């Protein structure tokens, strides 16, 4: 997740800095196409749907070839597994239209914000999704966070504030593409609110419905791509500065055709976002959406290092301090850094809650089994 996320951010920023000639006799222009970049992201996500159905076919074929047990034994295994796992309703693909809207809006604002601000500041501000994710999870998912969770969030806020100051107090001669840091930072924060909504909705759906991570990402990509293509069609006919349009998709494809390195970055962006979202949904399904957002914040280190190596910005100690506080808060939230006395108390408290929950579930299952036997006439 950290590796693929870093590739996606760096590739998108690299595209924003490219100056390539498109159609016509005009001079080369920058690759400024935020809606098309969003569509490219959804293409990568949509590809996950084909990968999902292909994996289903492969697994089914392999199972049929290797099946050695009798039909009765297989039936017993199925009944045993069904008894252990609660029955989940199969997901209606339309439910993923809601997170797709949040994904579309958030990603478009992120692409625009990245164009106006620094790559490392952009990535560090994206850590604010942890704050909004935690708040929304407590409100809508009824999750309870411990003291170390909230203290970690406070440190993340402090780190974000420090990093945000770096884009206001300093103007970096070596920085590339930072046209309006304040506007870019504001757009990134708004996008993070939308992404937090997306993460919470996804966690709600993957817990309620029987849907594989690849299937979830694929359907979000389908709905997101459908909506983005409509926007691109409309923007093409609105007068603007992008080859006489507000956003000219045809001109963007001409730029990609004339620049192999730009095309490679586009393909890399689509591929990396597919893996990134697949891993993210998997973490959401197995752990929680808040854990997913905190892990995502850790890729700040890689973005910061790459930005310095490529000369996109100059080294600032204020950024280094903000980065250190941000990572410390992220590690504290996920239990990598532990508060000695408090951690032992917290573990015992969680163990007691788990025991009570297991006892209540056992009692409920017993009553349900008795009711089923009575209905069956025993």
Image (tube, rainbow, N blue to C red):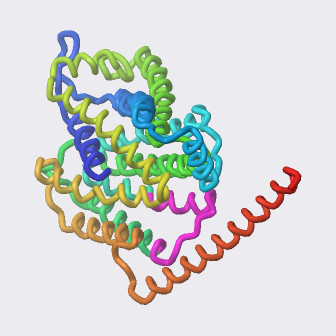
Q: How many marks overall?
A: 0
Position of residue 189 measured from the top left corner of the image (x, y, whole percent): 43, 52
Q: Is residue 135 magenta?
A: yes
Q: Is residue 256 above or below residue 120?
A: above
Tell me if I can see residue 303 in this picture: yes
Position of residue 269 measured from the top left corner of the image (x, y, whole percent): 28, 36
Q: Is residue 28 left or right of residue 134?
A: left
Kindly report the secondary structure that dominates the magenta region of the rendered protein: helix
Query: At 32% from the left edge and 22% from the top edge, which residue is drawn?
Result: 241
Q: Is residue 198 left or right of residue 368?
A: left
Query: At 43% from the left edge and 29% from the top edge, which residue is drawn?
Result: 57
Q: Is residue 86 above or below residue 162?
A: above
Nearest to the observer: residue 304 or residue 316: 304
* Region of the chain picked out in magenta, as a range: 130-150
Query: At 50% from the left edge and 78% from the top edge, which residue is drawn?
Result: 147
- Quadrant of the image occupied by residue 68: top left
**Residue that extends furthest to the bottom in the rendered view of this protein:** 341
Query: At 88% from the left edge and 52% from the top edge, which residue is drawn?
Result: 377
Position of residue 176 measured from the top left corner of the image (x, y, whole percent): 18, 44
- Quadrant of the image occupied by residue 17: top left
Q: Is residue 233 left or right of residue 350?
A: left
Q: Is residue 152 above or below residue 47?
A: below
Nearest to the observer: residue 360 or residue 38: 360
Q: Is residue 140 magenta?
A: yes
């Amino acid at each position: 997740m950290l590796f693929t996320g870093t590739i996606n951010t760096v590739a998108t920023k690299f595209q924003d800095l490219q100056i390539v000639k498109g159609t016509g006799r005009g001079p080369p222009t920058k690759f400024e196409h935020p809606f098309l970049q969003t569509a490219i992201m959804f293409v990568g996500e949509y590809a996950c749907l084909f990968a999902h159905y292909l994996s289903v076919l492969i697994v089914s074929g392999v199972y049929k070839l290797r099946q050695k047990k009798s039909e009765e034994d297989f039936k017993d295994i199925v009944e045993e597994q069904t008894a252990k796992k609660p029955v989940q309703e199969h997901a209606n693909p339309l439910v993923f239209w809601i997170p797709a809207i949040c994904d579309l809006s958030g990603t478009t604002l992120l692409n625009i914000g990245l164009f106006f601000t620094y790559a490392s500041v952009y990535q560090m501000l994206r850590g604010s999704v942890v704050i909004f994710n935690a708040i929304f999870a407590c409100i809508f998912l009824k999750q309870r966070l411990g003291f170390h969770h909230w203290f970690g969030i406070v440190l993340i806020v402090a780190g974000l504030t420090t990093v945000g100051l770096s884009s206001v107090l300093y103007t970096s001669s070596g920085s590339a593409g930072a046209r309006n840091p304040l506007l870019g930072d504001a757009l990134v924060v708004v996008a993070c609110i939308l992404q937090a909504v997306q993460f919470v909705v996804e966690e709600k759906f993957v817990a309620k419905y029987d849907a594989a991570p690849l299937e979830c990402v694929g359907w979000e990509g389908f709905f997101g791509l459908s909506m983005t293509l409509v926007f691109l069609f409309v923007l093409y006919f609105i007068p603007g500065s992008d080859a006489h349009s507000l956003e000219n998709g045809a001109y963007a494809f001409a730029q990609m055709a004339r620049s192999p390195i730009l095309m490679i970055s586009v393909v890399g962006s689509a591929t990396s976002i597919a893996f990134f979202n697949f891993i993210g949904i998997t973490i959401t399904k197995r752990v929680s959406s808040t854990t997913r957002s905190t892990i995502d914040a850790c890729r700040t280190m890689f973005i910061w290092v790459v930005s310095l190596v490529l000369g996109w910005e100059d080294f600032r100690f204020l950024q280094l301090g903000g980065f250190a506080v941000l990572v410390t808060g992220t590690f504290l939230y996920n239990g990598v850094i532990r508060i000695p006395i408090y951690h032992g108390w917290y573990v015992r408290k969680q163990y007691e809650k788990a025991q009570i929950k297991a006892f209540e579930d056992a009692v409920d299952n017993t009553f349900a089994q008795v009711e089923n036997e009575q209905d069956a006439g025993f």
